[in-house]
Amino acid sequence: MEQNPRRTTKHKRKSIGFNIIVAVLILSIVTICIALITDLVQQNREQTASVSVKIDSEQVDPDVYLKSESKEADTFTSYMTYPYTKIESIDIPIKQFVTEQENKFYEEMETVIDMLGESFQAHFDIQTDVEKIAEQQYKLSITTEQLVEKDNEFKQLHSFIIDIEEEKIIQWDDVFQSNENNELYETIIDEFNNKKMTESINGEQLKEELENNQIPWLFDEKQILLYFNPGQINDNDEFLVEEIQLISIYPFINESYESMLLSEEMKREIAKIEEELQQEQEQNSNESEQPANSLGGKKYIALTFDDGPHGVVTDRVLNTLEQYNAKATFFMLGQNAKNMPELAKKVANKGHEIANHSISHVNLRAVSTERVHEEMVTSLDQIEQATGIRPSLFRPPYGNRNDIVDNKAQETNQKIILWSVDTRDWESLNANSVYESVKTYAKPGSIILMHDIHPTTADALPQIMEFLSNNDYEFVTVSELLPYVQGSGIGPYYGIQ
């Protein structure tokens, strides 16, 4: 039977129309469901975010205002006080930070409610301290506290240093500069008194986190303060605050920020240090011009090794010295001697001179008098216990010393020993470079500075010994050399330069 084409077309149109209606209904239902879900979520947010809101502001300085926002709901209370300056480049990052912290609080609340199936009165708080440090520069310390679960309080700190005139937030790497060896960051780590923290962070990591604003920092008249928030390092439950003495890192401060960081008192202290360094350099220069005939025609030379003992390198150094029947002076770190007593004892048993280089290689100019005592005196006990010998020679780390160090050396009968030839083996880490330094600068009466912790130094030593032996040098300890090159007293002694 033949179909009617018109009837078929009409039937198809009805079918299409019906499908469209169904699709529209389904879309409407989905839309309504999404709207209901969104509304429920929003209601939940409103219940947790803002039943009542109060906003206020006050001017705390001609350039800085504090905005206060208080919120109260059945499940939480919050109070936020944060700064603004009416400068977008400063205000936007600060507001973003505050908003992020607030959102984290709400998210944590929702997570706890979902997990426990119940809620209690949570609390959120942001407080800001504002301190003017120059005509148009300010330190902002923002503390965030939240209590979402019973007996589980979280607290962290963030800092901003702002420049109104330049309309910017001052970053760490605006203020400080470091060389390729990250000497700034290694110096900072040397300042850390907490050993557990020192073992958990290195120079590269510290550099990255400071330059990426992950470690809050502020400063006062004499020090930089680094704040490690809970959980940031070594699983710390509370704030860890490390104090870095400005006097120890002032060479790394960019000149344009010296006025911000350095007080007049600090500048006078730095000037005194630089004057002492200049006097030492002039003394070294004068000594280098003196003839070597005070050695009685002998070509004595003293090889010294710092920072050991080292589990691998020290043995290699000892083997090379033994081949030339040479005695040297080992300036040991107390902590290394304590950790490797058998190796430290081996150095002594080989007839080498045992000397003191502090406990942990800290910059003695940048620590308290109590810490100087510990580094210079407790190290004597550690080294004596390991080697059976109590040192009478002390080499301050980095060669840094002051009146406190000198007085402590006098009290404990330790002569301060520096050097006249610095191989800079720690810097080059190149055997040939170390050898060339000795070859170029060694002369009768020299005290040669090397380190028995670098494999490249051990690599260079056979060539150094061969050169010095072929040129008729006689290897002596520092104590054996001193009568020929200096007078009596605590020093410092440099040998002949």
Image (cartoon, rainbow, N blue to C red):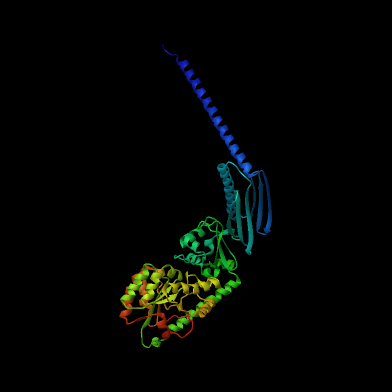
Quarter-of-image position of residue 356:
bottom left
Point out residue 80 in the picture as x, y percentages from the top left corner.
64, 52
Q: Nearer the viewer, residue 164 or 299?
A: 299
Q: Nearer the viewer, residue 244 or 207?
A: 244
- Can residue 108 be spotted in the picture? yes
Residue 487 position (above or below residue 155): below
Q: Residue at x 51, y 76 (%)?
A: 401
Point out residue 492 in the picture as x, y percentages from the top left corner.
47, 80
Point out residue 182 in the picture as x, y percentages from the top left corner.
46, 65
Q: Nearer the viewer, residue 457 or 166?
A: 457
Residue 472 position (above or below residue 183): below
Which image quarter is the N terminus in?
Answer: top left
Q: Nearer the viewer, residue 328 or 296?
A: 328
Quarter-of-image position of residue 321:
bottom left
Which residue lies most toward the top here? 1
Point out residue 452 in the picture as x, y percentages from the top left corner.
39, 71
Quarter-of-image position of residue 341:
bottom left
Which image quarter is the C terminus in?
Answer: bottom left
